[in-house]
Image (tube, grey):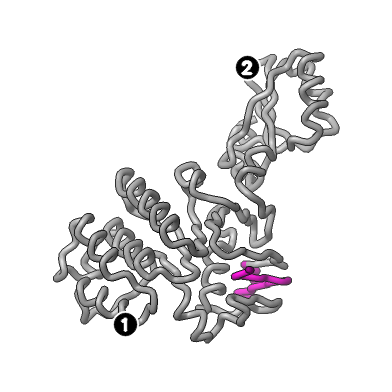
């Protein structure tokens, strides 16, 4: 079952086009990573899926409905981000009570256990919390809501390393116990890669790829050898990243096509092969140049 379907989706703000001709679908009960650099369009896309904003053109369906102003989408989805606003008249304990009345699948016991684990107190006010504590409380609301579609936009902002680990662990345990569609936008792909099933990669509002994490791990391969050898060999290859090491050695990342041929060439020409992580693949694909920051100084 497809929870989200996008066809030719565009979003324009004045003279700026945030999303360009997006086409993709997200299946039910999967954890998808929405990856991209700042300004890639991740937050805009999440807000459109949540029904907070309307697209400029194209079509989007969530639960087979246009999400904008849809009560069905509002009651069965949640967007957790650093812009979450709660009534200032309510303390944290009262916020949890109010959430229980809005979200039909709300798990009050889970919310209270997480609330106590992270040392919150009922009388605290959301507006008085530190940035990291706000993110942690928002995470509690997102997990306890048990919404059919749960979206997290940079959920670990402000959290220290130990709390981030706790969050990912809690998310995985909750997903295993109660599967649902989870979409996570984050700059920390290396931290959550093992959680994800699919990655949707955006650059400048456009989709670069949408595929299982297992496929992205095989998407590229690193090669290293004498510059005089690799200069000629790389001529007809799709080079994602390249740098010179010293004066005689080159390291490059290329698309992993014709794997056996690459292995044969490596043995014949005497260069080495290295795996490339999903995180590095996404970095290289969204980079402005194939040489990274090093190219600025050449």
Answer whether residue 16 is visible to the viewer in this image.
Answer: no
Residue under pointer 1:
101
Quadrant location of the C terminus in the rendered image: top right
> Which of the 4 quarters of the picture holds residue 56?
bottom right
Picture coordinates of residue 230, whole percent (x, y):
77, 21
- The secondary element bearing badge 2 is classed as loop
Answer whether residue 19 is visible to the viewer in this image.
Answer: yes
Q: Chief secondary structure of the magenta span?
A: strand
Is residue 77 on the magenta stretch? no
Q: Magenta segment range? A: 1-18
What residue is rendered at 31% in x and 82% in y?
Answer: 101
- The secondary element bearing badge 1 is classed as helix
On screen, residue 20 versus residue 176, left or right, reads right
User: Between 47 and 120, which is closer to the camera in this rendering?
Assistant: 120
Residues at marks 1 and 2, CA–CA distance in whole angstroms: 64 Å
Q: Which mark is residue 246?
A: 2
Q: Earlier in the sequence, mark 1 or mark 2?
A: 1
Picture coordinates of residue 221, whole percent (x, y):
69, 31
User: Between 242 and 165, which is closer to the camera in this rendering?
Assistant: 165
User: Do the numbered discs 1 and 2 sit on residues whose CB atoms are within 8 Å?
Assistant: no
What residue is rendered at 37% in x and 63% in y?
Answer: 143
Label 2, residues with CA under 10 Å away: few <14, some 14-19, many ≥20: few
On screen, residue 201 versus residue 230, left or right, reads left
User: Between 82 and 227, which is closer to the camera in this rendering?
Assistant: 82
Q: Which mark is residue 40?
A: none
Picture coordinates of residue 232, whole percent (x, y):
83, 23
On screen, residue 70 versus residue 244, left or right, reads left
The total of numbered circles placed on residues is 2
What residue is rendered at 67% in x and 35% in y?
Answer: 241
> Which of the 4 quarters of the picture holds residue 269?
top right
What residue is rendered at 38% in x and 66% in y?
Answer: 142
């Amino acid at each position: 079952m497809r929870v989200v379907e996008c066809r030719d989706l565009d979003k324009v703000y004045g003279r700026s086009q945030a999303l360009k001709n997006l086409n993709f679908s997200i299946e039910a009960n999967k954890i998808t990573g929405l990856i991209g650099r700042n300004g890639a369009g991740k937050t805009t896309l999440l807000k459109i899926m949540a029904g907070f904003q309307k697209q400029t053109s194209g079509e989007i369906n969530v639960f087979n409905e246009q999400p904008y102003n849809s009560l069905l989408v509002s009651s069965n989805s949640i967007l957790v981000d650093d812009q979450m606003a709660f009534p200032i008249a309510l303390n944290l304990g009262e916020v949890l009570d109010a959430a229980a009345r809005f979200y039909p699948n709300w798990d009050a016991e889970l919310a209270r256990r997480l609330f106590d684990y992270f040392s919150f107190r009922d009388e605290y006010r959301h507006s008085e919390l530190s940035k990291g504590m706000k993110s942690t409380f928002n995470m509690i609301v997102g997990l306890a809501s048990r919404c059919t579609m749960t979206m997290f936009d940079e959920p670990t902002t402000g959290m220290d390393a130990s709390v981030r680990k706790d969050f990912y662990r809690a998310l995985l345990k909750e997903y295993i116990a109660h599967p649902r569609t989870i979409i996570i936008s984050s700059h920390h792909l290396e931290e959550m890669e093992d959680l994800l099933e699919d990655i949707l990669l955006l650059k400048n509002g456009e989709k670069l790829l949408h595929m299982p994490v297992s496929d992205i791990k095989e998407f590229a391969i690193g090669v290293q050898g004498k510059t005089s050898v690799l200069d000629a060999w790389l001529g007809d290859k799709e080079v994602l990243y390249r740098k010179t090491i010293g004066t005689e050695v080159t390291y490059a990342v290329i698309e992993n096509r014709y794997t056996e041929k690459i292995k044969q060439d490596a043995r014949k020409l005497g260069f080495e092969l290295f795996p490339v992580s999903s995180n590095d693949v996404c970095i290289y694909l969204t980079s402005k140049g194939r040489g990274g920051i090093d190219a600025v100084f050449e």
